[in-house]
Image (cartoon, rainbow, N blue to C red):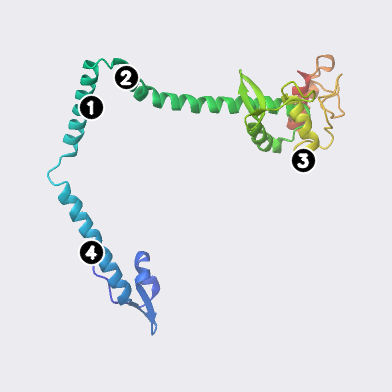
Amino acid sequence: MALKNKYASAAEIPAELKPFYVERDGAWLLDSERNEELRQTNITVMKERDALLKRFEGIDPDEVRKLAAEKARLEEEQRLKDGKFQEVLADKLKAAVGPVAAERDALNGKLSALLIDQAVVTEATKRGLRPTALTDITARARNTFKLVGGLPQAFDGDKPRTGKDGFSPLTLAEWVDALVSDAPHLFEANAGGGAAGSGSRGAGSGVVNPFRKESWNLTEQVKLLKNDPGLAARLKASAN
């Protein structure tokens, strides 16, 4: 397509062509140097296209694929004749299992993340985890814990982390207890440290826990669920 030599305003110039125009005397004129650059670029592209077309002239892509498949079949037959059955079988299994293995690994990763999320939220909820801190604490947990034998285990890089006794693996409960001190903004101000309180009180909340067996109260449960779902969730978790 030939370029116009002149436009009355910049708004009239197609966006992709604006680099090739300059403003002079209140109008937009075709920049001869840029126009020559564009022309040379088009010539180069056309030459490359023609060279590729000539290179593959008369070649049918579908036929090429069939020939490649036939070549692979003949090579496989020759390998079988040479007694390389195990190699052929291994290659076929690799080709078939590769995508399945990748999908399996992806699903295992998602399952691990979900199980770690569930475990840490359960522990943190007992200590007054703020509902707005779920994303933060689960991200921290995923960076620290891996599933080992179906259970979360803490690591520093590839090295397992130990708990307070310096020997046993660090537990989720110990890790969350440390967070209560190190990242108090993740927890309610009155949550305090350590595990949930005993008796009928709940998670340092200072209120009777209506979800505990000894203080079960369905009316209070309904009120809490309606007025303060976050506290209700924490009390329910600490009652288990």
Query: Where is mark 3, residue-wise?
Result: 185
Element on which disc 1 rests: helix
Q: Which of marks 3 and 1 is in front?
A: 1
Three-letter amino acid code at disc 3?
Answer: His
Q: Is mark 2 on a helix, strand or loop?
A: helix
- Observer-side mark, 4 or 2, equals 2
Mark nearer the viewer, 1 or 2 = 2
What is the x, y in percent for residue 219? 79, 22
Q: Mark 1 points at which residue?
A: 72
Q: Which of 140 and 17 is in front in this view?
A: 140
Residue type of the residue flagged with mark 2: Glu
Q: Mark 4 points at which residue?
A: 43
Q: Which of marks 3 and 4 is nearer the N terminus?
A: 4
- Badge 4 crowding class, 10 Å Cα cut-off, few under 14, some 14 to 19, many 20 or more, is few
Q: Which of the two discs, 3 and 4, sits closer to the camera?
A: 4
Q: Is the C-beta separation of discs 1 and 4 under 8 Å?
A: no
Q: Report how far apart the C-alphas of labels 3 and 1 lie in the structure.
A: 62 Å
Residue 225 in which image quadrant: top right
Mark 1 and mark 2 residues within 8 Å of each other at the beta carbon: no
Question: Who comes first in sequence, dot 1 or dot 4?
Answer: 4
Task: Report how far apart the C-alphas of labels 3 and 2 lie in the structure.
Answer: 59 Å
Q: Where is residue 212 in the image (x, y as percent from the top left)?
A: 80, 18
Q: Where is residue 199 in the image (x, y as percent from the top left)?
A: 87, 18
User: Which quadrant of the figure has residue 174?
Assistant: top right
| Nearest to the observer: residue 94 or residue 83 | 83
Task: Tell me which amino acid carries mark 4.
Answer: Ile
Residue named by callout 2: 87
